[in-house]
Image (spheres, rainbow, N blue to C red):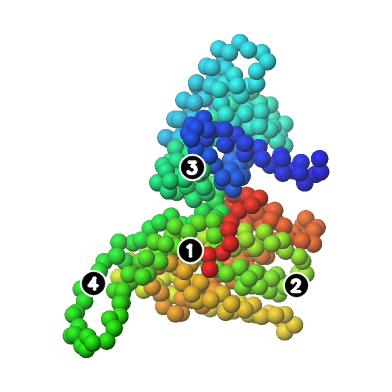
Amino acid sequence: MTNSLLKKKQNRFFASYIGKLLKVEHPKKGITTNTKQQLNSVFCYLSNCLSADSKKMARISSKKTISESEILAVVCINFPRKIYLKVKKKFTAACDKSEKSDEKSVSRQEKAGVTFPPSITEKFLRDDSNMMITKKAPLALSCALEGLCEEIFDSAVGYSDLNKKIRLTIRDIELAVKNTAANEVFKKFSIKLLGCGYVPFIHPALTVKKPQKRKKKGDTSGPKTHRFKPGTVALRDIKKLQKVFNRVILAKSPFEKVIRALVKNKGHNVKISKQVFSILQYYLESYIVGILHRSNLAAVHAGRVKLLPEDIDFILALEDRSLPLNINIDDVKEDDDPVDTKSITAPALQRLARQGGVKTMSSECVDVIRNLILMKAGFICDAILVVNNQGGTKTIMPSDIYSAIEYLGIRLAKAEKFGEPNAN
């Protein structure tokens, strides 16, 4: 087996067990490969974080052994109370069942009656540590991950039934996370799913219909033309675009040209894997939609329906970010190619704004959004090039972008294959 295949196999710690757990809880449901891979990445990251916190907890108590009490203490701190009580109950039942089992040729997983194997969670607890581990500590970590997964599945199945789908998609998982206690866990560890779309929301102030004056009837001899009332088409587009998931809104080719120009202007002549563009575009679109959504709330709070550049500046200022209006993106050498943002068209950015619930925006907002994309993409490209340079390779791979964004404070769920052709 080659090193690349071995590495992929090692990274799929929980992938097969996620599907098994779903079959145990909901026998008639399935799950897509993309969803399974991203959830596997989430649980691997949580296992690393909980294991590291458990080691700190043991050191605080002046212990040289990680026990189940440290695991449960860390779960109590990081998980909501509802999930913590569920995990504690599950762990107690698993311990009782394991103690009553007299079978010797059976794994710890089967003895305890859990789906996530303690043998896998034990690898995370023992990773780069000289500390000893009690027998029940890996079982406690397995119960913690399994309890969180069950909480997500119970809600995701309901959304899947509403869409009359048999297999759970990444969209169902995102909606389930946002509307359950699991959202606190994802926020605490800064975990984001890719290609899951946006949670549907239209501010009630945008749906208020204003009274209109009746116009005098003119010549009715000609053919009658149909016109929608102002705002009808905008609200219809918002509802339509907020249902889009696993697809990008902006055209792929202009976006790739912008990223290549940014990398070239930074003085690096490296190759870029095609999947890097997809990952970066999914993340940047999600980031921009989030900014526009919060900016729209600021506009509504100011008593306006139209989004203005001042609203975007206000949100960025609250988040301690530099304002995009005065950014000089094209400050490059004479030999370098300028970064052409005009290829990202205004209608495409309008669709991105509609996905964030924006009913209408001024024409100045288009340039602001373009500069915002360049500013965020520039920060990420700097981090990617540093990570790639440390790796000593001449090609930017998906692992570089995942590591770079993680250094910037965001953990993206990994998947080998995701997404569909763009929505244009």
Point out the frontmost of discs 2 and 3.
3
Q: Give the image location of residue 89, x and y in percent.
A: 46, 25
Circle 1: element type: helix
Which is more toward the observer, 245 or 414? 245
Give the residue type at disc 1.
Val
Point out the frontmost of discs 3 and 1.
3
Label 4, label 2: how many angstroms apart (C-alpha)? 55 Å
**Sooner in the amino-acid sequence: mark 3 or mark 1:** 3
Residue marked by disc 1: 289
- Which class describes the residues within 10 Å of circle 2: few (<14), some (14-19), or many (20+)? few
Label 1, label 2: how many angstroms apart (C-alpha)? 30 Å
- Which class describes the residues within 10 Å of circle 3: few (<14), some (14-19), or many (20+)? some
Point out the frontmost of discs 1 and 2.
1
Circle 3: element type: loop
Residue marked by disc 3: 166
**Sooner in the amino-acid sequence: mark 2 or mark 3:** 3
**Sooner in the amino-acid sequence: mark 1 or mark 2:** 2
**Quadrant of residue 392 within the rendered picture:** bottom right
Label 4, label 3: how many angstroms apart (C-alpha)? 42 Å
Q: Give the image location of residue 278, x and y in percent.
A: 62, 61
- Against 162, is 118 above or below? above
Point out the frontmost of discs 1 and 4.
4
Residue marked by disc 4: 210
Which is more toward the observer, 150 or 310? 150
Give the residue type at disc 4.
Lys
